[in-house]
Image (cartoon, coloured by chain):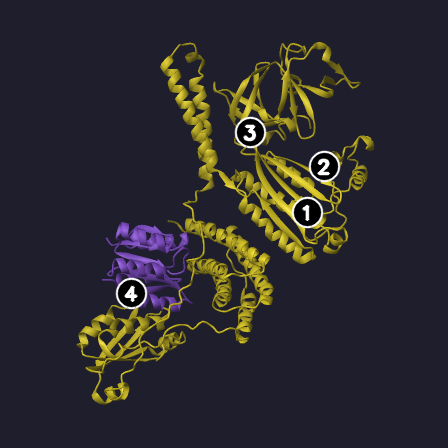
Chain colours: A yellow, B purple
Amino acid sequence: MSDDSMLEIYLYENSQLLDDFESLLLTCENTESFSADQIAELFRILHTIKGSSAMMNFDSIANLSHALEDLFGYMREHNTRKDDYASISALAFETLDTIKAEIAKIQEGGLPDADVTAITKRIRDFIGLLTSRKEPPPQQDGGQDASPKSGQALSGRGYQAKITFQSEAKMENVRAFGIVKSVEEMCTGIVTVPEDLLENQSADEIVANGFTLYMMSEEEKSTLEEKIREAFFVQDFTIAELDDAKTEEIFGPADSAEDTGTKTVSRSADTAGTVSIKQNYMSVNLSKLDLLMDIVGEIVITESTVTKNPEILKLQLESFEKASRQLRKLTDELQDIVMSIRMVPVSATFHKMERIVRDISVKTDKRAKLTIIGEDTELDKNVLDNLSDPLMHLVRNAMDHGLEQSDVREAAGKDPVGEIVLKARNSGSDVLITISDDGRGLDRDKLIQKGLEKGLIEKDISEITDKEAYNLIFAPGFSTKEEVTEFSGRGVGMDVVAKNIRKIGGSVHVDSKPGEGMEVTIRIPLTLAIIDGMLVSVGGFTYIIPLLSIRDSFKPGKDDVFSDPAGNEMIWLRENCYPILRLHEVFGIETEVTDISDGILVLVESQSLSYCLFVDDLVGEQQTVVKPMPLYISHNFDSIKGMAGCTILGDGSISLILDINGLVK
Amino acid sequence: MKTVLVVDDAAFMRVSIKNMLTKNGYEVIGEAENGKIAIQKYQELSPDIVTMDITMPEMDGLASLKEILKADPSANVIMVSAMGQEGMVREAVQTGAKGFIVKPFKEDVIISALGNLK
C-alpha cells in the first residue's frame, strides 16, 4: 500500500476521532462534569491519535495529543476540582484546534510544523499545578519489587547476568521486569540493579548502565541463559557464575529470603463501561461512489432504451415484457441502494455547530444552548458537504444578531439562556432543515427601510407582506448588520448563504415573530443526481421540466390570455395573474404550435415567482439522470440561460433539463 | 508462513502493521478492533501470533490477553503499547504476553520482535 493511501487512512480516521473528541468535550463542558467514562474515552481518543501520529512522524500532533493525554490521564487517576473544569476544557479546546490546524495543513499537502512547545508547556504546567495541590490520594501504582517465590529458602548457586537492550527497545525497565518474571520460577533468590524496576526512571538507568540480574538458582547456567535469550530486543547478554563471597554479599546469609510476593495491583483502565457503538462501517473513496452513481444512471437509461425501443414495442412479445418488467424492478432497487449508500446522517454536521455556539457565547458573553432535533435525517453526501458553510453562517447569524444579551432577555421576561434549535426532517422528496432562535426577531420596518435605500423594493410599501419583508435579508447586497462582528461579519452576507443553498438545488426562506425570534427554513432535495421530470415537446425538441417545480398544466382557452401594456402575455388563473413564457420564443425554435389554444401551459413555481411555460405538448413523465453540461459547452457560452443540465432519453437522444429559476432571470 | 491476528482500534495502526508484516513474509489472517472481537477471531482463526494494542474500547488489550491465554496458554501474544503505559505493559508481561513493542516503531522493530518468537 502506498504512503498516500496510508496518509488517507490516517487523515480520515483522525478527523473522525477529533470530531468525536470535540463533541464529547462539548458535552462535558455543557454538563460541567467529567465522568470517569468520559475521561477514559477522551484519554483513549488522544492515545490513539498520539500513536498514529507518532508512526507518521507528525511530531507536533503527537506531542500535543501526548500532553493532553497526560492531563486526562491525571484526571483519570485523581479527583479534580470542579473549578478547574473551565481551564481544562479551555486548554483541551485550544489543543484540539491546534491539532485540527495541523491536520488541515497535511490535507493541503503541507507538513504539520507548528511550534507546539508553548502550548504543551502550558498543559504540563497545569498538570504540575494539579499535582502540587496533592489532592486526593493518587491511586497506588500497583506492585512491589519483583522477587522470587516467597517462602522459599535460598539455595543453589549464584549467577550474574548483564543485559543491555537495543536502542529502539524502549520501556527498558519493563523489559527487565519481564526477564525477571521469566526466570523467577527457576530461582530461589533474585536481586536486580537497578533495584526498582517499577520506577520508570530506571529505564534511563538501564539505558546508561545496562541491567544486572543476580540470580540464586539450582538450575544449570545454560538453562537460565536460554531462558533469558528469549527476551526481546536484547543487545548484549553475558552470564557468569558468582563466587561464594560475592553470592553472600548480594544475597546475604542463606536464610534471608526476601518475602514479597510479586503481586501487582491491576490498574487496567476501566473502559469496559464505555458504551461505544461501533457499527460495521467501511470507508469508501467518494469518487468510486460517484462513478457507481454514474453507471447506475447509465443503466437506468439503457434499461428504458432497450425495453422501450420503438422497434420492439411494435412486436407483441409476452416473455420479453415479463423479463423487462423484472429488469426494471431490479434497476429501481439498484438505484435505491446506490442512493442510500451516498446518504449520510446530518448529525456530524449539526454537532459541528455546537462548537460555534460555544465559542460565540464565550466571546460575547451571551448565554445560549443549541438543541438538535432529527440528527438521524439523511442527506446525499455531496449535498451535505455543501450545506455545512451556509449552516454555520446561519447559526452564527442567530447567535450574533438574533439572540440578545442575557440582561436584555431577562428584562423582556425571557429565559436568560437563549436557545437555538437546529432541526432536520424529511418532507416528501425533500429534507427540511430549520434554524430557529428565540431572540429578538426581525424588524419589518427596518428591513423595508433598508430595502428602499438599496433600491430592492419596487412595490408599494403597503403591499409588502411580512414574509416578503423578512426574505429581503437574502436579497443580494442586503445586510441588516449594524456593526461587523468577528463571527458573522466576514464579508459574507445572507445573500451568499442563499446562493450557496440554491447551488445545491435547495431553497431558503425566513419567517419571524418580532420579539420571539426567527426561523430560517432550508428545503433541499434528497439527492440531485436523479430527478423525476416531465418531458415536453417544443418544435422537434424535447425538454424536461423537473416535476417538483410543476404546479399545474392545462390547455388554455383563447380568451383566458391577455397582454399587459408592455405586450407581455398573461393569464388569469384562480384569482391569480401569471406571466406566460413561450419556450419556442425563448430558445428560438420553429414550431407549428404558436396559437395559445393549440398548445399546453405548464404552471411552474420558481423561487421568486410562479409563471406559465407554453409548450407544444406534454410527452410524459420520466426519471432522468441529471448530467452536467459538457465542458466545451459550458466553457464556450458564459451562461446557458435556463439550462440545469442534460440527460439521455430512452431512445438515446439528448434532452435538456430546464432551470426554472434561471429562465426568468 | 506464520499467521498473525492484528488487534488495534485504530484502522491506521492495523494497516501499518499489516503492511510491515506482509512485506516480511507473515500472513495477516485477521484484524480486530477491540479486545472482544480479538477473542472471537482468535478462536476462529487460531493464528500463530497476535499483536495486541492495549488501549481499546469495549475490551482493552489486557483483558483480551487474559481471555486468550485462558483458552490457549501457549498463545503468542505481543503487546503493542505506547510510552506512558508501563504499568499495563508490566501486567501484560506478568500475565503471559510474550513481549511488547512500543509505538512508534519502525518495521525492523516489529519484525525482530516477531522473529524472536519460537
Q: Most extreme residue toward the front, as rendered?
A: A413
In the image, which is nearer the foreground, mark 2 or mark 4? 4
Q: Secondary structure at mark 3?
A: loop
Q: Amino acid at mark 2?
A: Asn
Q: Contact (CB < 8 A) between labels 1 and 4?
A: no
Q: Chain of mark 1?
A: A
**In this view of the protein, which residue sits in the foreground, A264 or A248?**
A264
Residue B105 appears anywhere in the view? yes
Residue matched to label 3: A629
Residue A109 appears anywhere in the view? no
Label 1 to label 4: alpha-carbon separation:
59 Å
| B91 relative position to A304: left or right | left
Q: Amino acid at mark 1?
A: Ala
Q: Chain of mark 4?
A: B
Q: Amino acid at mark 4?
A: Gly
Quadrant in the rendering for residue A605: top right
Q: Chain of mark 2?
A: A
Residue matched to label 1: A398
N-term mark: 3 or 1: 1
Callout 2 and callout 4 share a chain? no
- Circle 1 crowding by C-alpha within 10 Å: few under 14, some 14–19, many from 20: many
Q: Quadrant of the C terminus of chain A?
A: top right
The dot on residue B96 is 4
Label 2 to label 1: alpha-carbon separation:
15 Å
Residue matched to label 2: A471
Q: Which residue appears at 62% of the width and 46% of the height?
A: A392
